[in-house]
Image (cartoon, grey):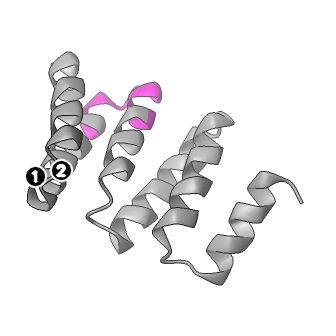
Amino acid sequence: MNRLEVLQSMVEQNPTDAFSRYGLAMEFKNGGRLEEAIDQFVTLLEHNPSYTSGYFQAAQTLEKLGRTDDARGLYRRGIEAASAAGDDHAAAEMQAALDILR
């Protein structure tokens, strides 16, 4: 089994597990399978709305797809989630990315 297959198997076994879902999304992203990555990030955030790294990576993926309005919205949601979690570093990182998109 390759890395992608292992991650897919992990997600199948536990669909709401943030770690394996994030790993699968990143594997798709890094492999240039951006639409599939977005699908995984969306599912990740539906089940784990406080997973701040998911917002950042999903928004970056949307930027690569040219979907800047969607990316802006996701950065904003991520900033809210990070602020609620007290993760000032993640909030600042997403704010900086959002500022660049303006």
- Quadrant occupied by the N terminus: bottom right
- Residue 64 sits above or below residue 61 on the image: above
Could you tell me which residue is drawn at 61 percent across and 56 percent down? 24
**Mark drawn on residue 96:** none
With 28 as the anchor, is 84 left or right in this view?
A: left
- Residue 83 sits above or below residue 88 on the image: below
Q: Which quarter of the picture shows residue 46?
A: bottom left
Farthest residue to the right: give it: 1
- Quadrant occupied by the C terminus: top left
The residues colored magenta run 61-70
* Disc 2 target residue: 87
* Disc 1 target residue: 83
Assess whether mark 2 and mark 1 are in contact (beta carbons under 8 angstroms): yes
Q: Which quarter of the picture shows residue 57?
A: top left
Disc 2 residue type (three-letter):
Asp
Could you tell me how many numbered marks the image carries?
A: 2
Q: Secondary structure at mark 2?
A: loop
Q: Residues within 10 Å of mark 1 (few under 14, many from 20)?
A: some
With 15 as the anchor, is 80 left or right in this view?
A: left
- Residue 81 sits above or below residue 8 on the image: above
